Image: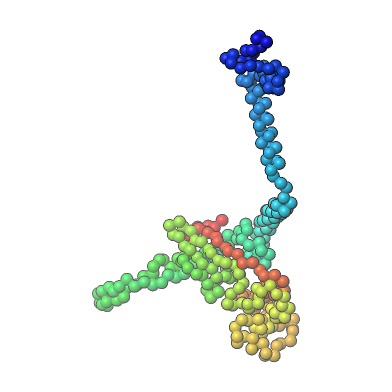
Amino acid sequence: MAAFSNWGSDTGSATFDPWSKDATLQEDSVANEQAIPTDSPQNSEYFEQDSVSKVAGDQYEDVAFDPLQFAQGFAKKIAQGYGAVKEAGLGAAGTAMNQLPDRFNLFARYMTGVGNRNLQLDPSTLTDLRIATEQTPPIVSLGQKNIKGIGQVNVAAPVYGPFFPTTGPVNPYYTGAPKSVTNTLGRYTADVNPSANTIEFKDTYDMTNFSENPNLTSGKIQPQKAWNEIESIWNPVAGMRNSPKPFFPLSSRQTNPSYNPKTALDTAKMSSASSTFSPATRMARALMYMTPWKPTPFNVDITVPMRGEIK
């Protein structure tokens, strides 16, 4: 028995029993250490993979499937996809609408909700908008000057040269501006920057204003008002029925002329020169009175050079 007294102990102070459970575990440990060295790459890789698999397994076991959360996430992805597709479609529609004449381009965007996406106006329209900003500047007094033979006289001079683009609101309806201005932006604001040689046009395209009937943009179908607009093409009194001004509706009580092809044609020719009551604008209003949704206002912000050709 003395031969086994120091087996497995470097100090010789412990007694080893080869038939015990601890001995069996110790033999397995020694065998494993001999089979795979501690500093072996295979040994490190083995324990590393084992640790990762345990952690991954623990995480998988801890996460419970939540049907509601899954459905919400799925719905969010669907909504995001739909939003991207819708935005791409609206952008493509905006590009296509640029092929229309500018006043129809803007009106179509207003009625369909395309808004200012990819908006481009014709250079001729932008040139007319720039010309509409030109105003004779105010005369500023420079004081008095003694002129020989005349005496003291007031001397005044304009702030800038005549017809200089001016910053501020632009109302083209009473200045003889062409329809390329009155039937596109109408009233707008100009911001002139001489140092940068630019003019910025700003406007909110919207038919809701003091000159139009409030019901025009209500999104309600109103056949009678729509017919009033159409009838006004040959009977100007009919258009007064839709006027928001109090004294205009009273005029509709007058005897309305009966329809006559020649009279209708002559009236249409006369009104075609109008910026606000031409047959095209009458038909546009009639369409709005028959549309069961509200049009969508949108902002217009365009910068052009103050001088030179607009491309």
The one of 147 and 285 positioned closer to us in this rendering: 285
Classify residue 181 as left or right of residue 196.
Answer: right
Considering only vertical position in the picture, is 229 above or below 306?
below
Considering only vertical position in the picture, is 21 above or below 192?
above
Question: Residue 154, position in %: x, y?
Answer: 31, 75
Farthest residue in the front direction? 1
Classify residue 190 as left or right of residue 179.
Answer: left
The one of 119 and 22 positioned closer to us in this rendering: 22
Picture residue at 65% right of the left edge, 77% below the top:
215
Considering only vertical position in the picture, is 114 above or below 24?
below
The one of 295 and 126 positioned closer to us in this rendering: 295
Residue 17, quarter of picture: top right
Question: Residue 188, position in %: x, y?
Answer: 54, 68
Where, quadrant-wise, is the N terminus in this rendering?
top right
Picture residue at 34% right of the left edge, 73% below the top:
141
Classify residue 308 as left or right of residue 88.
Answer: left
The one of 306 and 30 positioned closer to us in this rendering: 30
Question: Residue 306, position in %: x, y?
Answer: 48, 60
Task: Please indicate, yes or no, whether residue 140 appears anywhere in the rendered image.
Answer: yes
Picture residue at 58% right of the left edge, 74% below the top:
209
Farthest residue in the top direction? 3
Question: Residue 114, position in %: x, y?
Answer: 66, 61
Picture residue at 41% right of the left edge, 66% below the top:
161
Where, quadrant-wise, is the C terminus in this rendering?
bottom right
Considering only vertical position in the picture, is 57 above or below 157?
above
Task: Please indicate, yes or no, whether residue 266 appears anywhere in the rendered image.
Answer: no
